[in-house]
Image (cartoon, rainbow, N blue to C red):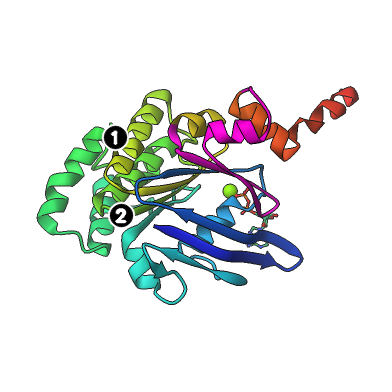
Amino acid sequence: MIKTQGLSKRFRDIVAVDRLDLEIPPGEIFGFLGPNGAGKTTTVKLLTGLLRPSAGRAWVGGFDVQTHPREAKRILALVPDQPYVYPQLTGKEFLRLVGDFYEVDLSHQKKKIPEFLEMFELGEWGDQLVETYSHGMRQKLVLAGVLLHQPRVLFLDEPMVGLDPKSARLVKDVFRNLAGKGVSIFMCTHVLEIAEKLCHRIGIVQEGRLGLVGSTEELRRKADSSGSLEDVFLRLTGGDEYHELLKYL
Ligand SMILES: Nc1ncnc2c1ncn2[C@@H]1O[C@H](COP(=O)(O)OP(=O)(O)O)[C@@H](O)[C@H]1O
Ligand SMILES: [Mg+2]
């Protein structure tokens, strides 16, 4: 459902994404992990057609994102790291806008919008302006919008930031459920514990290069570590070098 070949993005002298080769089948939850600045958000922007690659190609659902952007965008959804929602719309108005934009059948919208608001505990907020929502509530509203148009491929950039524990649990269940229905999920996250519990496969990216890809078990084996994903991650990304720096404290 997602495929890249030599996908690269350069910003002047920075190589943000460096010859990425990836294939993600239907129903897979793929965790894209890496330190700050590794190129995760840039990759998501390339895969969703928000940025043009410097080299290489990307396909979503078999459609080349560059040459067939309309077809690709019709079946994908993106939850960006900043949940941008027009502040002067109410929650319901926002969902109607999303529904109309994706040409979702009106009767489906009428049925689903109240259900999704209820599910995300926004039932009493549907008629309030989004500007009164917290970050986590906006995040959930964006997710409700995503569910409304039933994408086959879902991109999530740090989806758990700002969610309280109950909402985070709900959202995880929603992702599992979608994957069970064949939706492919590409998720950037810093939260290793979530990646470990939720993702079928994990890719670790560093300075734009995809290092290791595999299940948590496979990564552990490759990193020669019996520890948690955090240990594996820090070992692979050299993140334990900070121990040296503690002497400056
Ligand atoms: N629009 C841009 N112009 C110049 N450099 C950028 C731009 N967007 C991202 N970068 C750089 O590309 C690298 C990867 O950034 P990003 O994809 O946001 O990383 P991540 O999401 O993994 O934290 C960083 O060095 C960042 O500074
Ligand atoms: Mg990012």
The response on whether ligand 2 sits within 8 Å of label 2 is no
Find disc 2 in the rendering and name its residue.
151
> Where 125 sits versus 65, above or below?
above
Residue 60 lies, in percent from the top left, at 41, 62
Q: Quadrant of the C terminus?
A: top right
Q: Is residue 219 magenta?
A: yes
Q: Which residues are magenta?
A: 198-227
Q: Where is the N terminus found, in terms of image quarters?
A: bottom left
Q: Residue at x 66, y 42 (%)?
A: 35
Q: Hey, which residue is sitting farthest right in the picture? A: 248
Task: Give the crowd class for mark 2: few <14, some 14-19, many >=20 residues within 10 Å.
Answer: some
Q: Is residue 110 above or below residue 200?
A: below
Identified at 24% across, 34% down, the residue is 119
Could you say which quadrant of the image residue 229 lies in?
Answer: top right
- Residue 140 in the image, given as x and y percentages of width and height: 36, 40
Q: Amino acid at mark 1?
A: Phe
Reading the image, the residue beneath label 1 is: 120
Q: CA distance from mark 1 to mark 2?
A: 18 Å
Q: Position of residue 246 (x, y in %)?
A: 84, 24
Q: How many marks?
A: 2
As for residue 141 lying within the magenta part, the answer is no
Amino acid residing under circle 2: Pro
**Does residue 132 appear left or right of residue 237 in this picture?**
left
Between 136 and 17, the one nearer to me in the picture: 17
